[in-house]
């Protein structure tokens, strides 16, 4: 069970690493340091500084090599600071123009991380090679690492290419279509992986037994607070029980868990109740914020927040709101074409029945359009487009989903009527 919990925590750690600006630059910096040591070793082995110069190697003396490496190191650390400043400004603009919820799509961007890594790695390489350059005036034997200096020059040319790239890339990544498209891609990935949930064999409502009254069931309360980021279901199915046991999880992934709040109910009671309670608590992965590891509703929330921000008087950008409504309709229609998540799950070789709350289509529709409907009620164009999107979704959705989508369209019409009367 510990392995199951660790596996889920590793998934969360992997997503936090992807969203960090330090991991890939750190790896590339270490690579640059290793490359410097290897190239200097090669220079020592070949001894090109002691032979006649080669046309493909650096032909300057010790002072020339020092000048080149010092120029490389000094200029690159300056350029890195400039790129970092541009990135910070980009994050600030994204937070102000869109929503703070989409900042992870910028910090997770591989282009930005790669540029930082290449610049810092080249700086590190130049510094480590510089310390090996020795002239006749020094106390040591003269040594000019010709090949190492040549590699430093080539790395600078690569950095120039990355500088041109990052100027273009930052200008593109701040555009509304690019931001919205990245959120949609996250949503599509989560739909493919997590909706409906694929955590075991399905058990449907008519096969479930309600929890008995009295003291024959146990309530599990959280000992910590935070956002529910993921659930280690493998650990729950791996519980050792004396007989069949049902675990009903009470909160959706993405919910905020208060300390002392009920997170699960189990029945019947087990002899090893304390170990069971600890396992259930440990299976709930809590964190300071919602993540894209398993939270299907988070991309929906991000797109809705961008639309709401666009409708605010300070931004006043209904075109962006319309674009978000289109994309929300796309994601929700994909979900509507899938089956409802099962009520509960079981697995072979496990006596545990697991009831997991799932993000249903009515819940996701309200999450997507509820606040847009409220804040956009006075914008005729936005509301007309929202109703049009919902009506088109009705035409394309399976018959079982059409009623709840029509309900959303009726709520939009009611919001327009209230706004007109007031």
Image (spheres, grey):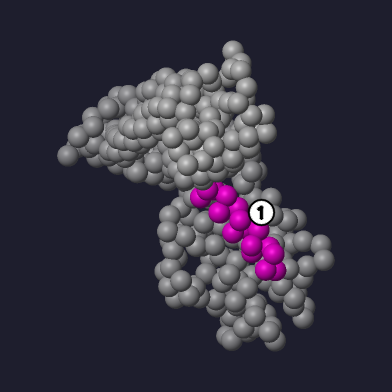
Q: Main secondary structure of the magenta part?
A: helix
Whether residue 44 sits left or right of residue 158 in the image: it is right
Q: Is residue 256 left or right of residue 89?
A: right
Q: Is residue 62 left or right of residue 305?
A: right
Q: Position of residue 283 (x, y in %)?
A: 60, 66
Q: Which of the 4 quarters of the picture holds residue 413?
A: top left
The x and y percentages for residue 82 are 32, 32
Q: Pick the residue in front: 61 or 343.
A: 61
Seen as rendered, the residue at the extreme top is 55
The correct choice, above or below, for 222 with respect to 33 in the image is below
Residue 164: percent from the left, percent from the top?
Answer: 42, 19
In the image, residue 405 above or below residue 57:
below
Say which quadrant the N terminus sits in.
Answer: bottom right
The foreground one among 117 and 212 is 117
| Total count of labels | 1
Magenta residues (range): 1-19
Q: Residue furthest left?
A: 422
Residue 320 seen in this snapshot: yes
Q: Is residue 351 magenta?
A: no
Residue 332 appears in the picture as rendered = no
Per the image, label 1 sits on a secondary structure element best described as: loop
Crowdedness near tag 1: few (<14), some (14–19) or many (≥20) residues, C-alpha within 10 Å: some
Residue 303: which quarter of the image?
Answer: top left
The reply to whether the magenta stretch includes residue 10 is yes
Q: Residue at x 52, y 27 (%)?
A: 149
Q: Residue at x 46, y 71 (%)?
A: 224
* Placement of 189 over or under 261, stated as above or below: above
Circle 1 is placed at which residue position? 342
Q: Nearer the viewer, residue 75 or 296?
A: 75
Which residue is depicted at the point 48% across and 55% down?
254
């Amino acid at each position: 069970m510990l392995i199951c919990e660790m596996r889920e925590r590793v998934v969360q750690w992997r997503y936090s690493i992807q969203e960090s600006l330090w991991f890939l630059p750190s790896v590339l910096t270490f690579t640059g340091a290793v490359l410097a040591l290897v190239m200097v070793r090669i220079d020592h082995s070949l001894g090109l500084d002691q032979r006649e110069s080669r046309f493909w190697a650096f032909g300057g003396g010790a002072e020339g090599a020092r000048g080149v490496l010092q120029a490389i190191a000094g200029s690159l650390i300056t350029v890195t600071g400039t790129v970092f400043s541009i990135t910070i400004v980009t994050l600030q603009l994204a937070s102000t123009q869109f929503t703070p919820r989409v900042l992870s799509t910028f910090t997770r961007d591989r282009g930005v991380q790669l540029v930082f890594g290449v610049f810092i790695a080249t700086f590190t390489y130049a510094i480590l090679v510089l310390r090996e350059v020795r002239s006749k005036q020094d106390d040591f034997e003269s040594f000019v690492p010709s090949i190492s200096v040549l590699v430093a020059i080539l790395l600078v040319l690569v950095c120039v290419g990355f500088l041109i790239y990052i100027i273009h890339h930052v200008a593109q990544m701040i555009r509304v279509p690019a931001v919205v498209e990245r959120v949609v891609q996250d949503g599509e990935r989560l739909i493919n992986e997590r909706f409906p949930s694929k955590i075991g064999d399905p058990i449907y409502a008519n096969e479930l037994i309600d929890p008995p009254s009295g003291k024959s069931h146990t309530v599990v309360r959280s000992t910590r607070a935070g956002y529910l980021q993921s659930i280690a279901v493998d650990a729950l199915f791996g519980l050792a029980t004396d007989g069949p046991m049902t675990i009903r999880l009470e909160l959706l992934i993405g919910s905020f868990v208060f300390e002392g709040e009920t997170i699960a109910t189990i029945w019947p009671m087990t002899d090893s109740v304390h170990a069971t309670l600890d396992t259930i608590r440990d299976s709930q992965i809590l964190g300071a914020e919602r993540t894209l590891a398993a939270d299907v509703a988070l991309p929906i929330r991000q797109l809705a927040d961008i639309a709401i921000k666009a409708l605010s008087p300070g931004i006043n950008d209904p075109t962006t709101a319309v674009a978000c409504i289109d994309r929300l309709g796309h994601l929700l229609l994909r979900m509507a074409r899938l089956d409802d998540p099962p009520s509960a799950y079981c697995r072979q070789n496990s006596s545990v029945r697991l009831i997991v709350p799932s993000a249903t289509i009515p819940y996701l529709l309200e999450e997507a359009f509820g606040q847009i409907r409220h804040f956009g009620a006075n914008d005729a164009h936005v509301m007309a487009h929202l109703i049009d999107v919902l009506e088109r979704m009705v035409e394309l959705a399976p018959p079982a989903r059409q009623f709840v989508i029509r309900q959303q369209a009726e709520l939009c019409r009611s919001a327009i009527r209230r706004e007109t009367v007031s």
